[in-house]
Amino acid sequence: MHTHSDFTSNSKILIVTSVSAERDAVLRGLQKSDRFDIIIGGVGSAAAAANTAAALVAGQYGLIVCAGIAGGFSDQAGIGSLVVASEIVAADLGAETPDGFLSLDELGFGTARIGVDAISGRRIVHALLEAGLTAVSGPILTVTTVTGSAATAEMLSARIPGACAEAMEGYGVAVAAEQRGIPVIEIRAISNAVGPRNREAWRIGDALQALESASTVLMEVLS
Ligand SMILES: O=C(O)c1cccc(C(=O)CC[C@H]2O[C@@H](n3cnc4c(=O)[nH]cnc43)[C@H](O)[C@@H]2O)c1
């Protein structure tokens, strides 16, 4: 579990996005900095893990950043704002029982929670706020199914107190990073509220603009 910053100042940083629109927004924000490599890892934890692991075979990295858009829990993160993970939690990885959900940890099969590079995370949140952007830190959930009801949103918030956002890849990227002993962070821009499905209400353009601005800050903080 990585809770401190141990990447060297001259090592390269790998950024993993899910889709090309996210990659393009990040690239615009990075302004051609050569400190970063960026890949499209695909949608979902499995694709993200496999593609991140392949990139780690091909290159040497000191830090891995999972970046993209996400759903925000309404009491924590509004549309167009930014979230930085305090930990990455595979929220639906476990077993349903008549008495409730059992996580991977409770089942004794490892952990559904992966720690992040806390020092880099704090520096990034501080810099985002300094840049006038809206940002919070909290657990970012990785889910297999996009939440589509208020009941599921409430259940996830209760299961992981302080959860600020959900997306679909962070845990996969983090598992690949952890297996190589490389610190990881996750940063997301909120495109929609976690809750009843309403695809027309997704503000992907606003989120991609926020992701671009955040990437400029990321470049300044990590370069
Ligand atoms: O249609 C587009 O132009 C477009 C541009 C960028 C990204 C997308 C996606 O659909 C990306 C899917 C990606 O988004 C994450 N995500 C966003 N909101 C949620 C959510 O409420 N719950 C879970 N995941 C969410 C997720 O990581 C997907 O990989 C489309």
Image (cartoon, helix red, strand yellow):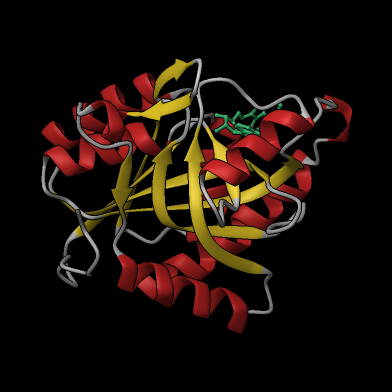
Relative placement, left or right, of 88 versus 29 is: left
Task: Pinpoint residue 210: horizontal percent, then vertical percent.
Answer: 67, 57
Closer to the camera in the image, 114 or 33: 114
Tally of numbered discs? 0
- Residue visible at 76% across and 56% down in the picture: 78
Task: Pinpoint residue 68: horizontal percent, then vertical percent.
Answer: 54, 43
Residue at the right extreme, as displayed? 200
Task: Pinpoint residue 83: horizontal percent, then vertical percent.
Answer: 57, 58
Closer to the camera in the image, 92 or 8: 92
- Residue visible at 33% across and 43% down in the picture: 113
Q: Is residue 24 visible?
A: no
Residue at the bottom extreme, as displayed? 130
Picture layout, residue 127 above or below residue 154: below
Picture layout, residue 220 above or below residue 46: below
**Residue 62's quadrant in the figure?**
bottom left
Relative placement, left or right, of 16 versus 43 is: left
Q: Classify the position of the C terminus by image quarter.
A: bottom left
Q: Which quadrant of the frame does ligand 1 lie within?
A: top right
Relative placement, left or right, of 134 versus 24 is: right
Q: Is residue 102 visible?
A: yes
Closer to the camera in the image, 127 or 9: 127
- Residue visible at 25% across and 36% down in the picture: 175
Task: Pinpoint residue 208: horizontal percent, then vertical percent.
Answer: 67, 47
- Residue visible at 88% across and 28% down in the picture: 200
